[in-house]
Amino acid sequence: MAKEAKKYWLMKSEPNCYSIDDLAAEKTKTTHWDGVRNYQARNFMRDDMKKGDEVLFYHSNAKPPGVAGLATISKESYPDFTAFDPNEMHYDPKSKQESPTWMMVDVKFKKKFKRLIPLEELRQVKSLDGMELLRKGSRLSIQPVSKKHFETIVKLASE
DNA sequence: GCCAACGTTGGC
DNA sequence: GCCAACGTTGGC
């Protein structure tokens, strides 16, 4: 069996809820990405995310919004247990222990960019044309990123 | 299966 | 705080 090529992702988080600094401050530098309640985003986590895949950590609903740094997938999908707990904000009674509706992955901190790359700046970059994040009305909280787009953004961050 | 009403996301 | 663009829900 040939080893699958590494894939690239963008994951959104609201920094006033959970920022890249919060991730870096975790004892294990790792968190479980709970609370995703969108089927498309879940399918990406469940079907396509593999350990070792690289992640752009994006700050949404921030001033300014933008890519804050890098992370990696450290554990492949497993049931999002926060969906089972009525006290949890993202509790979903439809999700059953024996057939969980919602899944999550573990994400590990890799690096924080020296500067946040604002969404507005990304919009100016010609070679990022077609990126899901830049599509008008794009709301998907987990989205695949092409290798080319991923590398372009990493390069921007190192300048 | 259609679609209106409603809720959420997230940039501005 | 506004609102456009979605996704979900539920009546029919």
Image (cartoon, coloured by chain):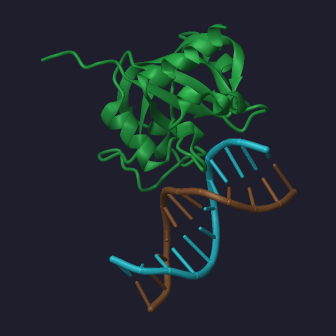
Chain colours: A green, B cyan, C brown
For residue A118, side relative to residue A1 (left or right)? right
Residue depicted at 51% across the width and 44% down the height: A85
Q: Is residue A114 above or below residue A95?
A: above
Percent across and percent down for residue A149 are 49, 24
Nearer to us in this view, A28 or A23: A23
Number of marks in the image?
0
Q: Is residue A83 visible?
A: yes
Nearer to us in this view, A14 or A159: A159
Name the quadrant containing residue A43: top left
Can you say which quadrant of the picture contains the N terminus of chain A? top left
Percent across and percent down for residue C11 are 49, 86
Q: Is residue A26 visible?
A: no
Q: Is residue A10 above or below residue A86?
A: above
Nearer to us in this view, A47 or A134: A134
Q: Is residue A27 above or below residue A127?
A: above
Can you say which quadrant of the picture contains the C terminus of chain A? top right
Q: Is residue A106 above or below residue A113?
A: below
Percent across and percent down for residue A156 are 62, 15
View extreme (front): residue: A126
Residue depicted at 60% across the width and 50% down the height: A137
Name the quadrant containing residue A144: top left
Percent across and percent down for residue A82 are 50, 39
Name the quadrant containing residue A54: top left
Residue depicted at 25% across the width and 20% down the height: A4
Nearer to us in this view, A2 or A120: A120
